[in-house]
Structure formats: structure tokens, C-alpha cells
Image (cartoon, rainbow, N blue to C red):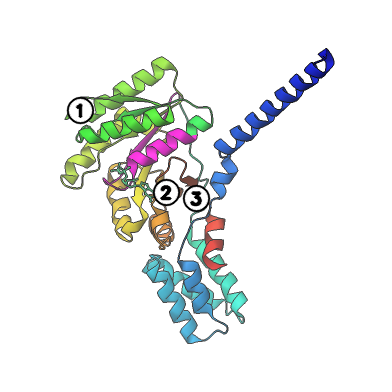
Amino acid sequence: MDGPILIIVAVVAVVLVVVGLVIWHRSSRPSEDTRAAAPVRSGLGPAIRRALGTELDDATWEDIESALLAADVGVESTTSIITSVRRSRPETVEGARIAIRDALRGELVEVDRGLTLTGSPASIVVVGVNGTGKTTTIAKLAKRFSDEGKTVTMGAADTFRAAAGQQLESWAARVGSQVVRGQEGGDPASVVYDTLESARAKGVDVVIIDTAGRLHGKKNLMAELQKIYRVAGGDDVSEVLLVLDATAGQNGLAQVREFSNAVPISGIVLTKLDGTAKGGIIVAIERTLGVPVKLVGVGEGVDDLVVFDPDGFVDSLVE
Ligand code: GDP
């Protein structure tokens, strides 16, 4: 082959490889927007559409009330929504749909739902009942931070269950984070201390602390969480996230109350929203307890964590 032809072939080959790498990189790394825009699935939408039907009468309001209650919106919010919609006297199905949308939106708190990451390292304490998805959520958070170029150290402060530490370790290996573990049955707060020391020494950006969530021995658990919170920095802790299982329904409200008595919950991660048609619990939690749902879990995969978008949520319920 002549020299010039060889050069052209080489240039074309390099261009093809670069284009291929760019396409691969984009498809293997979901953008913030894609993840934030993922829809929250709920069965409430079809139920409201059915209830609205083609014309409005007294039965319409009863059907909407039933649909809201069945979706875990809760009695307080349901009553407030129905009252405000009826008071607005919608004349058309479309008018009623908009009134329901606005009333639902009015039940959700007005706050910035982004995670606050202050301090170096920033510290996030994750609390919640066992089985709700704490460990999986920690892995998802670590993956999210690492996608943003931040380094993460996880602290396995559930020293009660050896399996919890192992599970965290295997997630950490998958998402490229470090883990600090303590002795089985050891003092969870000392794991928190060691995790922060290690993170500071290595200049790590974010520390995420896993905690125990056994329901029996509640009093001890709550005292343990308070100690963990203090050692993690008290008021300087960036976020205290409560993980709630969306399929637990109204029981979730009791869990928010219980954990709020021990530590100041800054946000809720509602998991397993993919496994239920009852997204209405979000409304009940925010209305009754004023704690914002910041993130939602929509699957078992490490990328299945999305920022909760209240406008998209209410739209998906009524459109
Ligand atoms: P932990 O005991 O609170 O640490 O809970 P795990 O993280 O071990 O999760 C318990 C189970 O819930 C596991 O089978 C997870 O795969 C599953 N899980 C966690 N989050 C989600 C979610 O958003 N959607 C679904 N479908 N499953 C989830």
C-alpha cells in the first residue's frame, strides 16, 4: 500500500475507535437527567381516571376518595384534597383533574430535595428498619456519588448482624468504594469514629454510615442511633436519611415518627416503589410529618435510585 493511503486508513481507524468509545461511555453511564426524570409508577392515575369518568356527580367524589385511600394517601390528606377540589366547583372532568392535581401538589412540602453535602468528608447516616433496603440504598448512593467523581467510604455500623457488614463489603467492591467494619457485636459508634478517621486520612469526599434496624429492643436501638449521630458529628452531619419500604403502607408513618424521636431525619428514601401501586404514601408522609421524600428506589439494581420529582409525580397520578 502507498504511504498516503496507509495514513488515510490509519486516520479513519482512529476516528472509528474514538467514536465507538464515546458511544460506549455515554450508554454505560446514565446522565443525571435520565435518572432524575425516571417516572414513579403508581396505580393511582388509572384509578383517578376511572373515577372521573366522563361526567361529574356525587359518585365521582366518592370514587376519587376511595382511590386516594386505596393508594395510601391517608385519611387526613384525602379529606383535605376532596374538600379543596369540591370547593373549587369544577364544571368539567378536565377542570376536576386539574383541581385534583393542584390539591395533591399542595399536600407536598416545598423544599429543595437535593442532598446536602457539607464538611470534608460529608457524612450521611442511613437509618431504617431491617429489610427496607438500607444496604442497597447505600450502594446506590455510593454509585451515584462515584458517577459524579466523588470518593466514598461506607461505615458498617450495624455490628449486630455479621451479614450486614459482608453485604456492604460486596456492594462496595461492585461500586468501587471502601468499607470500614468493626468487630461483630462491637460498639457501632466506634465504627463510625474509625470510618471518619479513615476517610479524613484518605481525603475521601463522602462517608455513608449503615446502621442497625432491628425492631425488637427498640429502646436500645434508638439510644444507639443517637450515639452514632453524635459521633458522626451531631448537627454537622450532612444528611440523616430514613429508608422506608413503600410496600409497608401506612406503617411507614409510624416508622418516620419512631426514628424522628431519636435523630433528626433530613429526608426519606422510599424504596420498592417499583413493587407497589401505592405511591400515595409519599403524600401522607409529607403532609402529616413534613419530612421530604428526597429519593425513591425503583428496583434492585445499583442505578435504580431516582431523585423524587414532586411535579412529575402529581402529573403521573392524574394524567
Ligand atoms: P436492609 O436490611 O434494610 O439493609 O435491606 P437490603 O438492602 O438488604 O434490601 C432488602 C431487599 O430489598 C433486597 O432483596 C433488595 O434487593 C430489595 N430492595 C431494596 N431496594 C429496592 C427497590 O427499590 N426495589 C426493589 N424491587 N427491591 C429493593
**Dot placed on the residue nearer the N-terminal end, 2 or 3:** 2
**Dot placed on the residue nearer the N-terminal end, 3 or 1:** 1
Question: Residue tagged by mark 1?
Answer: 187
Residue 14 shows in the view? yes
Callout 3, which amino acid? Phe
Callout 2, which amino acid? Gly
Residue segment shown in magenta: 120-144
Q: Is 130 located above or below residue 3 in the figure?
A: below
Name the quarter where the N terminus is drawn: top right
Callout 1, which amino acid? Asp
Decide whether residue 248 is among the magenta residues: no
Which quadrant of the view contains residue 93?
Answer: bottom right
Question: Residue tagged by mark 3?
Answer: 308
Give neighbour class at mark 1: few <14, some 14-19, many 20+ (Cα, 10 Å).
Answer: some
Picture coordinates of residue 167, whole percent (x, y): 29, 34
Left or right of 172 in this view: 258: left
Give neighbour class at mark 2: few <14, some 14-19, many 20+ (Cα, 10 Å).
Answer: some
Task: Kindly identify which numbered label has been placed on residue 299.
Answer: 2
Picture coordinates of residue 124, whole percent (x, y): 39, 34
Rounded to the nearest angstrom, the CA distance separating label 3 from label 1 is 34 Å
Mark 2 and ligand 1: say if the CB distance to the nearest ligand atom is below 8 Å. Answer: yes
Seen at 62% across and 80% down, the residue is: 92
Give the foreground label among 2 and 1. Answer: 2
Q: Nearer the viewer, residue 220 or 166?
A: 166
Picture coordinates of residue 8, whole percent (x, y): 80, 21
Q: Is 148 located above or below residue 279 in the figure?
A: above
